[in-house]
Amino acid sequence: MKIAIFASGSGSNAEALMKKAKELIGVKIEFVFSDKKEAFVLTRAKSCAVPAYVIEKKGTREKHEQEILHLLDDHKIDWILLAGYMRMISPTFLRELKNRHEGRAQVINIHPSLLPDYPGTDSIQKAYKDQVAVSGVSIHYVDEGMDTGPLLAQEKVVLQVGETLESFATRMHALEHQMYCKVLEQIANQELITRTYKRKP
Ligand code: GRF
């Protein structure tokens, strides 16, 4: 399975995936793609010896996505793992991918909340500000909505009494890395299971 990681920022999840992929048989991180030329994920890709491509959005979203599709086609990518990719994927892009993969778009995203709670940006900060007792991490297939696709994995993180935001965020990210690596392993073993969306009690 050839995998492309899409990331716009730091890339700690991307790094965890790149490292994990080296241990696995059946998956290869073909490249990291970023829409930001200054993204730190590009430095991480270099130190993991994984090729990286940048295509910044210059014109319309359609034009940008067509350029990305060409890149994916050139490399015959099977799966896209979003890891802090700060753009919505358009329905047209998803449809194009579905045409290439027998009706499945094969795009996965990781999100630091117990979806459907706290979709969108700054979820960790928002949950902390609200002092939500039980937060967590979700991994899901990408559909047209904002963090709405079918769940693949979801695990809880309990906020500790008096915990700082920094400590909470560190624990959330550590869980993200662990969970995303597990999903990568499932892709390698061709054993992904989709769950239906359900709010955790
Ligand atoms: C992660 O919290 C991920 O869940 C969210 O964006 C963040 C990216 O962090 N979608 P990093 O760039 O992987 O460190």
Image (tube, rainbow, N blue to C red):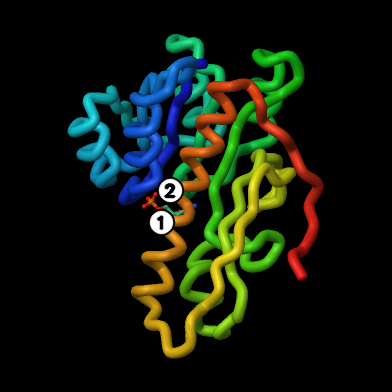
- What residue appears at the point 32 percent right and 40 percent down from the top-left corner? 15
> Do residues under tags 2 and 1 come within 8 Å of each other at their CB atoms?
yes
> For mark 2, what is the residue?
177
Q: Position of residue 196 (x, y in %)?
A: 81, 47
Rendered position, 44 above or below 27: below
Q: Amino acid at mark 1?
A: Ala
- What residue appears at the point 28 percent right and 25 percent down from the top-left corner? 50
The local crowd at label 1, few if under 14, some if 14 to 19, many if 20 or more residues have their Cα within 10 Å, is some
Q: Is residue 98 something that shows in the picture? A: yes
> For mark 1, what is the residue?
174
Q: Quadrant of the C terminus?
A: bottom right
Q: Position of residue 33 (x, y in %)?
A: 38, 31
Q: Is mark 2 within 8 Å of ligand 1?
A: no
Q: Position of residue 44 (x, y in %)?
A: 24, 39
Rendered position, 146 above or below 157: above
The local crowd at label 2, few if under 14, some if 14 to 19, many if 20 or more residues have their Cα within 10 Å, is some
